[in-house]
Every structure is written in C-alpha cells, then in structure tokens.
Image: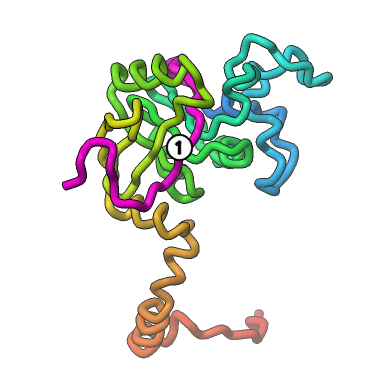
Amino acid sequence: MSAPGQGSGEVFHRGIAAPLPLPNIDTDTIIPSREIRRVSKEGLGEALFAGWRYRSAQTREPATDFVLNLPGYRSATILLGGDNFGCGSSREHAVWALKDFGFKVIAAPSFGGIFFNNCALNGILAIELEADSIERLADWTGLSPVDNQLEIDLQAQFIGWRGTERIPFAIEPARRSLLLEGLDGIAATLRRQAKIDAFEEADRQRRPWVYRCDSQTPSS
C-alpha cells in the first residue's frame, strides 16, 4: 500500500480547484438553454455558468464576484461542488461545457444520475466526497489556489493535498477503466467489435428473416 502522499506513479490529474459548494446546481444553470446554439461540443465552455459568469448575456461583461472570474481560479480544472450537482434535465451539453472550459474533475457529495454517467462517458472524473471533505479541500486550496493544487491519483483512488495527506474515493471499475484509457462509450463498445460480429453472424443463422430486406413494393 502506498504511503500518504504517494500513489501509483500515474497521476490522473493535478490542477487548481475552484469551490462552488451550492446544492442543487442543475444542468440549466451549468449551461442555460439559451446558450445552446450549436451541435458541436466545441466552444460551449464560453457559455458555462453564463447566468453567473456574466452581468449581461449580450455583452458578456464578467461578474467580478463569481469564482471562475477571480484571478486565482480562472485556470481551474477541478470543481468542488455541492450536493446533487448536475440535477435537472438530461442535457449532455452541461458536461460538454464543463469539459470545453477545461474541467477534468468534479467532486461533490452527490450528483444527478444522468449527469454522473455522462461525465465518465466524456472523460470527466466525477467523485463523490463527504461535504466536510469538500469544505476542507476548499479551505486549503483557497489560501493560495495556484500553489495549493490538488492531485488526483485514479489508479490508487485518492486525492492528494497539503503535500502529504490524501482523501480516498470510490469509483466503479468500469468508469475507472474508461477514464484511465481515455475511452468514450462508443470507443468502449468498439473494443468488443469481434464479439459483436460473432453474435450478429450467429443471430443471422438463427433468425434469418430478421435480416431480410425486401426492396419490392408490396402489391395492392
């Protein structure tokens, strides 16, 4: 077992952590529906928390008191959220916006279920932590956000902080593999292409009628 502060040697991410410990931040707050103007995932980071980041949606004048606009947190890649983070609608744009902004990790006491699943499928590590642990991390990083960065060891499953301390976290093996290997849902499925092809071939033999395509127009 690794000693405190020591991990597997394969750090998943190290970065600045921004505190946003409010409960029930829903997907419409993460990216308002009025900001969804494109199908592409790129460029959505500009719209992240648009209702809070900007004084005006039209002029994009920054709200100087919002955490991501504060000097120490502008390059944050870890978000310390509140209970039920990502609740509300199932819009995947919320995860896309967080990723496009630069977030790699979100830690919160709990998450909206669909949002939680979408995170792993889009390369974001969502970690469930007790509220007091979130508060301790936020207090420490807030002393000097750039200097007091968090280290996420996904192999050993802990958050390193204060130089030698760590907070363990749990993650399902399937999610862990997706993130460590950089796979999305489609890529993970395609790794089983041989088994998929074998099943389809066997199914063709069992149920050939399912695969028939009659191009003739039925007679009246």
> Residue 130: which quarter of the image?
top left
Q: Would residue 197 be seen by someone viewing this image from the given angle?
A: yes
**Residue visible at 35% across and 51% down?**
175
Percent x, y of residue 137: 37, 21
- Give the left or right position of residue 36, taking residue 177 as reference: right
In the rendered structure, which segment of residues is drawn in magenta? 1-25
Spot the residue most to the top: 65
**What is the number of callouts on the image?**
1
Where is mark 1, residue-wise?
A: 105
Image height check: is 71 above or below 41?
above
Percent x, y of residue 185: 46, 58
| Callout 1 secondary element | strand
Image height check: is 7 above or below 64?
below
Percent x, y of residue 122: 51, 49
| 12 magenta-colored | yes
Quadrant (top left/top right/bottom left/bottom right) for the C terminus: bottom right
Amino acid type at circle 1 is Val
**Residue visible at 35% across and 80% down?**
199
Spot the residue most to the right: 59
Spot the residue most to the left: 1
